[in-house]
């Protein structure tokens, strides 16, 4: 039994080592460059990008920059940059910023918003969590009114799934718009998101209907099919719970920091050298 346990521990250790090793992109003079380093490098320039999503050429370029960074760092150390007064002054500034930032983080982390507090806020402010009325529509865009009328004639008399299927077919074969490959699908949108003529026509439709007259806009002539309509509705609590907690936490954080700042200022000896001197009394 002891032998089995030891074997399992060794296997686990080897597996852990291999997982860690798989994160190492390169080793420069004994210093490892990891995927985490690459991710931080990418996030510093493009917050919404991720190293794993980049193509091989881009990943390789970032790896090369990180290798160069290590080499430049070693060279700077050899040349004694750490002893340079400018470097020391910069480090002091970084230290000050880091101290404040970490203190701020600890204050924020110390604030706990309970589920009941978030739910209470939601119930008192439901008007802030209203989803606007939206529609899901498709369209067929053609350059002239005659073609649009011919398409409408071809669709007349059809209903339900038969109408939808035929509309998608015609959108793919006759529409000149960029949504043609998707059967004219425009997705969901709210009032005001489309040009006025288009918006007026689509909001006048009932679910499952098409426009019986071509709709002219700056882009050409449209035949529109209303696939679905969603009425104004309150967003469920569970969907906005995390958003509410973050918001309440930030509000409490701002109050807490403001109160601490006020107390510290009241006890500190502060000389404001920018204040204008009082006018001489006559």
Image: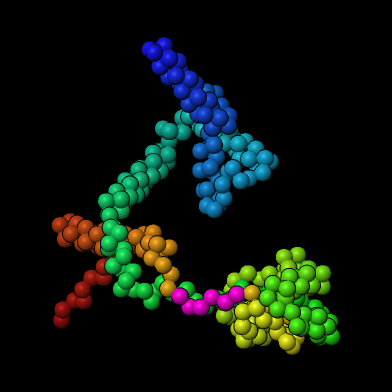
> Which quarter of the image is occupied by the N terminus?
top left
Please tell me whether the stretch drawn in magenta is mainly helix, strand or loop.
Answer: strand
Q: Is residue 250 left or right of residue 138?
A: left
Q: Is residue 27 above or below residue 110?
A: above
> Which quarter of the image is occupied by the C terminus?
bottom left
- Residues 123 and 178: in front is 123
Picture coordinates of residue 208, whole percent (x, y): 65, 78
Residue positioned 43% across, 19% down in the render: 9
Q: Is residue 75 above or below residue 132?
A: above
Q: Which residues are magenta?
A: 228-233
Q: Is residue 87 above or below residue 182?
A: above
| Residue 146 falls inside the magenta stretch | no
Picture coordinates of residue 230, whole percent (x, y): 54, 75
| Residue 230 falls inside the magenta stretch | yes
Residue 115 lies in what quarter of the image?
A: bottom left
Q: Using the rendered image of the protein, determine whether residue 49 is visible from the camera's viewpoint.
A: yes
Residue positioned 51% across, 78% down in the render: 231
- Residues 222 and 92: in front is 222
Q: Is residue 223 left or right of residue 18?
A: right
- Residues 268 and 39: in front is 39
Picture coordinates of residue 167, whole percent (x, y): 75, 74
Residue positioned 39% across, 74% down in the render: 128
């Amino acid at each position: 039994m002891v032998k089995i346990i030891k074997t399992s521990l060794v296997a686990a250790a080897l597996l852990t080592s291999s997982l860690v090793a798989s994160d190492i992109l390169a080793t420069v003079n004994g210093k490892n460059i990891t995927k985490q380093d690459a991710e931080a490098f990418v996030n510093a320039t493009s917050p919404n990008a991720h190293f794993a999503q980049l193509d091989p050429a881009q990943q390789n370029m970032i790896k090369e920059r990180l290798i160069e960074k290590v080499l430049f760092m070693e060279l700077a150390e050899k040349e004694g940059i750490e002893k340079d007064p400018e470097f020391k002054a910069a480090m002091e500034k970084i230290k000050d910023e880091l101290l404040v930032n970490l203190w701020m983080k600890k204050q924020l982390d110390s604030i706990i918003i309970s589920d009941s507090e978030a739910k209470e806020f939601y119930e008192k402010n439901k008007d802030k969590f209203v989803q606007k009325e939206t529609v899901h529509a498709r369209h067929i865009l053609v350059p002239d009114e005659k073609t649009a009328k011919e398409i409408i004639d071809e669709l007349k008399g059809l209903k339900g799934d038969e109408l939808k299927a035929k509309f998608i077919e015609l959108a793919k074969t006759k529409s000149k718009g960029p949504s043609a490959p998707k059967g004219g699908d425009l997705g969901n949108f709210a009032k005001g998101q489309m040009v006025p003529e288009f918006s007026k026509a689509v909001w006048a439709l009932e679910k499952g209907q098409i426009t019986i007259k071509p709709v002219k806009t700056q882009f050409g002539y449209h035949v529109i099919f209303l696939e679905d309509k969603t009425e104004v509705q309150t967003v469920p609590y569970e969907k906005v719970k995390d958003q509410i907690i973050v918001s309440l936490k930030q509000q409490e954080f701002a109050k807490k920091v403001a109160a601490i700042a006020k107390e510290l200022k009241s006890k500190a000896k502060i000389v404001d050298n920018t204040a204008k001197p009082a006018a001489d009394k006559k």
